[in-house]
Image: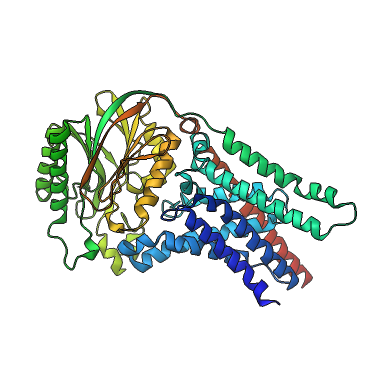
Amino acid sequence: MNPARAALPPALAAASGLALLAAHPPVGWWALSFVAPALLLAALWVESELAAAQARRPRTFRLGLLAGLSPYGPLLSWLLLPAGVVGWGLLVAVQAVWMGALAALLTPALQWRTLPLVAAVVWTGIDAWRAIWPLNGFEWGAIAYAHVDGSWLLPTARILGGRGITFLVVLISAAAAVAIAMATSAFRARQEGDLERDLDRRTRIPLAFLVGGLLASVLLTVEPPATDGSLEVLAVQGNDIRHWELEEPVPDAPLRITTALRNETLAAIDRDGVPDLTVWPESSVDRDPFTPRGEVLGELAGDAAAASGRLLTGASLDGPDPATERLIAALLLEDGFHEIDRYVKRRLVPFGEFIPLRPLLEWFPPLEQIPRDARPATEPQSMEVVDGITAAVIICFETVFTDVVRSNVLAGDEPARIVFSLTNDASFGDSAEPAQHIAQTQLRAVETGRWFVHAALSGSSAFVSPDGQLEQATELFTIDSIRAELPLVSGVTPYLVVGDVLGWLTRLGVALAAALLVRRFVERRRSVVGDG
């Protein structure tokens, strides 16, 4: 066997992953997301041909693993700082296994002219499954997030959600790849006078998918919902501590950060007047202010709330059993440290905010950094931040969970008119994580048709328009504030009305493909046993 040809499938699979990586921040070449599915299909085609020539089974699962390791390893490298090699390696391995499953599920359909549709359903469905399983799911690096800056596909999210963008990208990419492959086969097998007919027969269906995908990407758009009124928001960023660069820990970092937030808030109000609402990020009050050890932080937040009228601040609270439980929350304060409402985080990060199966795993030394498990809220929540104005709140990586954002927006008697995304991000250093994280907020803003206030403790903070555009984005690890009169949305997008229908349909498609693959494997085994 030609060694160069044998090396081609893994090279193509790795190139597919690298194209997906480069489509996301920090590189951000979103057009390369159209290349990744085609390269993976090419790897699977070549591997299948080699396997047939050698009378063996194609090793497509391995190629999928490689196509997952090559993007997710670098893409999630920001996790090395807080979680170490073990935590990073486990998360990357899970994402790579999902890509391996994607490749295996596509293998039976490689010679079908409907392969573009199959690939779009299975790829989107795999993303939808990894968003919920295992351990709450983690859909980081989905194709859709590469399209928040400059892609013509972004407005389709108002109807189809982010999964619609992924579906259309894979459909277009796979259709082009299948059409090229079919045309190449027609030229290789051409006979006198039959080429034109053979080309038409082989490429008609994939070209129909290609044209249909392109038309859908242009036509499936609506304008953002109408606005009615506005809210003047001051968002404050207060962490300039690059703790990983310091030889010794900062003495009482929570006190220093809350003090910086309080001082910046008072300075901004002194300079430009009192806003309708001031917003502080996640972990701004990082000790329970209702306890003696956190009382001083509560006093500082109370100073800011007294000056600004109303303050929405991220806070770490003790749970029912303070020794073992905690709450990740956002408190709405009025005229000093007087709580009038709160939001408690619903979707928690495993091994970051809680330890699954703690009695079995707590012996592992790195897990000592998480002595208490956070308790999630069980129901969607919204709050009236200013008289008559309902807002939704999401905390940290809840931005990646479309169901959490949508259900919080719809939690009240009327849909929330603005959304506050509070996050910390300080643990990830000067990495691509803040840019990747804010891309999720950009996509959620388009899906819901609402203005988002993305308030990050260490940056980047920004206002995000219903078109997904960033306004007044701050630098990382600076003490800063941004202020704007933000329009309030009175309507809903089609996506808010119908929800993630495409996600559920494609999950069903993956389950069906998996059942067919298992059936095929069982029949092959029976055939081997029967022949024996």
Q: Is 314 left, or right, of 101 in this rendering?
A: left
In the image, is 507 to the left or to the right of 82?
Answer: right
Q: Residue furthest right?
A: 192
Where's residue 25, x and y in %? 42, 53
Taking the image as shown, residue 488 lies to the left or right of residue 336, namely: right
Colour style of the rendered protein structure: rainbow
Q: Answer with the quarter of the image where residue 468 lies.
A: top left
Is residue 33 something that shows in the picture?
yes
Task: Name which residue lies at 55% across and 48% down.
Answer: 124
In front here: 135 or 406?
Answer: 406
Whether residue 363 can be seen here:
no
Out of 132 and 490, give the one closest to the viewer.
490
Q: Is residue 462 above or below residue 220?
A: below
Q: In this picture, is 114 found above or below 410?
A: below
Q: Nearer the viewer, residue 230 or 408?
A: 230
Q: Residue 40 placed where, x, y %?
A: 60, 59
Report the residue at 21% width, 54% height from top: 240
Q: Quadrant of residue 104?
A: bottom right
Residue 336 image point, x, y percent: 12, 35
**Where is residue 222 drawn, in percent x and y?**
51, 29
Identify the residue at image location x=25%, y=43%: 329
